[in-house]
Image (tube, rainbow, N blue to C red):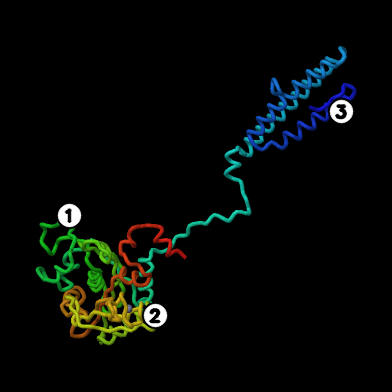
Amino acid sequence: MMKIGTENREANFEALEAEARQGAAELTTAEAVENFRLAWLGRKQGRLKQLSEEWLQNAAADQKKLLGQRFNALKTLVESLLDEAVARSRNTGWSDEALRVERLDVTLPGTRRLIGAEHPITRTMNELVAIFAGLGYSVGVGPEVESDFYNFECMNFPPGHPARDTQDTLVIAGQERRSQRDRLLLRTHTSPVQMRTMEQQPPPVRIVIPGKVHRNDAADATHSPVFHQVEGLCVDVGITFSDLKGTLDYAMKALFGSSVKTRFFPSFFPFTEPSADVQISCIFCAGRGCRRCKQSGWIELLGCGMVDPAVFAFAAEKQPAYDASRISGFAFGMGVERIAMMKYGVSEIGQFFAGDMRFLDQFVG
Ligand SMILES: [Zn+2]
């Protein structure tokens, strides 16, 4: 405790006042304010209590009154300093909690902000659309809940056609008993948009159709009941199979690199004639043969063909210019997940739909 002589009390009081002012100015937390109050005004251990007792004991009788007044003045000062400190903490909001939260250590690494990114399926679809947009294709869209007519019949799958069985169809609940042509279903392919587009506009048509499709497939490593297709349709005077081959060869090179080769095999789709399956040279082994291509050096990637005249006949009901004796066209379709799995080395299709950030984080940036 400060040794205080009675002979220079005025100086002593000034020193105490200065000390109190300085101490109060440094109060930055509620805890410090309370400690300051206890240190000066505490009833048992407070400095004013102890100093006043000590000084009054040693003071001459005629000085005790004056000394008492000085201690009261000092006590009033300390109390007002405390009030100011509390008011300041309220005004600036620096509670202990606020100080803890708002503390800024400029030497710490910054907080990493999560940046959104395109889902790998969206990215792949956009990439495909961009390739065909560069060839003058515009984007076609249509409903996911589709009528049997658009999904099957006008695409040359007549009622009872065995090819319907290859597309395990999800029929909208309550629609089972309607006539087959009228019932609603979840589209099994993006092909209905071909007809919806042709009904709306006369040839020439060049559209690329990205979209979600549904099939009643059991989920496994490469099958999902929901998946995505990118489909294309080109109709004009004088379109030939050579145009189809050139277009898809260009698109596959744009997608996988200029060293990729394509080859076409006869196939069957109800809405194209002739039809073809397209294989690309294996992007994993450059055609030498590996596990991914089953040692063949080739991977089957998409289906295509020349638009069947029967499809044009349906379009001609609303747009007579789709006269198969004057115009021709080709169509193609590919599974987006399959392409994304190849491009990004994904082995389970379900990972695209699980929403697991540990998987999706790989595609940020
Ligand atoms: Zn291979």
Expressed as whole percent of the image width and height from the top left, the position of residue 82 reads 69, 29
Question: Label 1, on which residue?
Answer: 173
Tell me if mark 3 has few (under 14), some (14-19) or many (20+) residues whose alpha carbon lies within 10 angstroms of its own: few
* Residue labelled with disc 2: 257
Which quadrant of the frame does ligand 1 lie within?
bottom left
Three-letter amino acid code at disc 3?
A: Ala
Horizontal and vertical percent position of residue 211 = 30, 66
In this orientation, does residue 143 appear? no
**Mark 2 beta carbon near ligand 1 (under 8 Å):** no
Q: Residue at x 23, y 71 (%)?
A: 191
Q: Tell me the residue that label 3 is attached to.
A: 11
Q: Is residue 2 visible?
A: yes
Q: Amino acid at mark 1?
A: Ala
- Determine the CA span between mark 2 and mark 1: 45 Å
- 117 relative to 103, above or below: below
Q: How far across and down, in percent of the image, does residue 256 sit?
A: 37, 78
Q: Nearer the viewer, mark 1 or mark 3?
A: 3
Judging from the image, what secondary structure is the residue with disc 3 in?
helix
- Callout 2–callout 3 Cβ contact below 8 Å: no
In the rendered image, the vertical position of residue 194 relative to residue 97, given as above or below: below
Q: Contact (CB < 8 A) between labels 1 and 3? A: no
